[in-house]
Image (cartoon, helix red, strand yellow):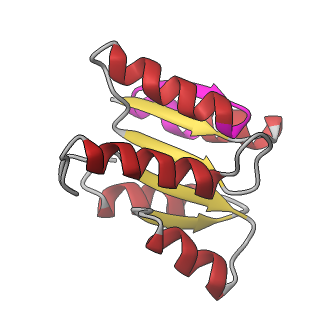
Amino acid sequence: MRILIAEDDATSALYMSGLLARFGECTVVENGEQALAAYHAARDEGRPFEFICLDIMMPRRNGQEVLEAIRAEEAAAGLDAAQSVKIVMTTALGDVHSVMSAYKGGATAYVTKPILTERLYETMCSLGFEV
């Protein structure tokens, strides 16, 4: 499985890549522009990401903007929910507005920081990935 981790905090990125490396190849980027570039490159190579973790508060396009751009491209390509990449929003923002905005934008799941190993693995299981 190919995994994209978009996280501007180096410590959080290292922690998440350590947790997720057992599931597949992890690519780590530090801002929204890099996340979209990595998404496009993987798709163009014919090896798209199957799982993306997007931090909401990132520079050069926040996670919500990246989420909406990816979902718009998938819709334009005629992909349905079953064919779309699983996107988990990871953020310190746990307020109702942030959570609802993420789901409205097409998030598959939402995990608040600090990221707990059990919570991330439970989320992956709920999305159909074997943990």
The residue positioned farthest toward the bottom in the image shown: 96
Which percent across, then down, holds residue 103?
Answer: 46, 72
Residue 30 against residue 74 in the figure, above or below: above
Question: Residue 104 sits in which quadrant?
Answer: bottom left
Residue 86 against residue 10 in the figure, above or below: below
Whether residue 103 can be seen here: yes
**Residue 27 painted magenta:** yes
Residue 17 against residue 121 in the figure, above or below: above
Question: Residue 48 sits in which quadrant?
Answer: top left
Q: What stretch is highlighted in magenta?
A: 19-32
Task: Please name the residue shown 28% across and 45% down the image.
Answer: 76
Which percent across, then down, holds residue 85?
Answer: 33, 45
The residue positioned farthest toward the top in the image shown: 45
Considering depth in this image, is 90 or 37 the residue closer to the camera? Answer: 37
- From the viewer's perspective, tell me whether residue 115 is left or right of residue 43: right
Question: Residue 123 sits in which quadrant?
Answer: bottom left
Considering depth in this image, is 128 or 64 the residue closer to the camera? Answer: 64
Q: Quadrant of the N terminus?
A: top left
Which percent across, then down, holds residue 109?
Answer: 44, 65
Task: Please name the residue shown 39% across and 50% down the image.
Answer: 72
**Residue 76 painted magenta:** no
Task: Please name the residue shown 24% across and 54% down the image.
Answer: 128
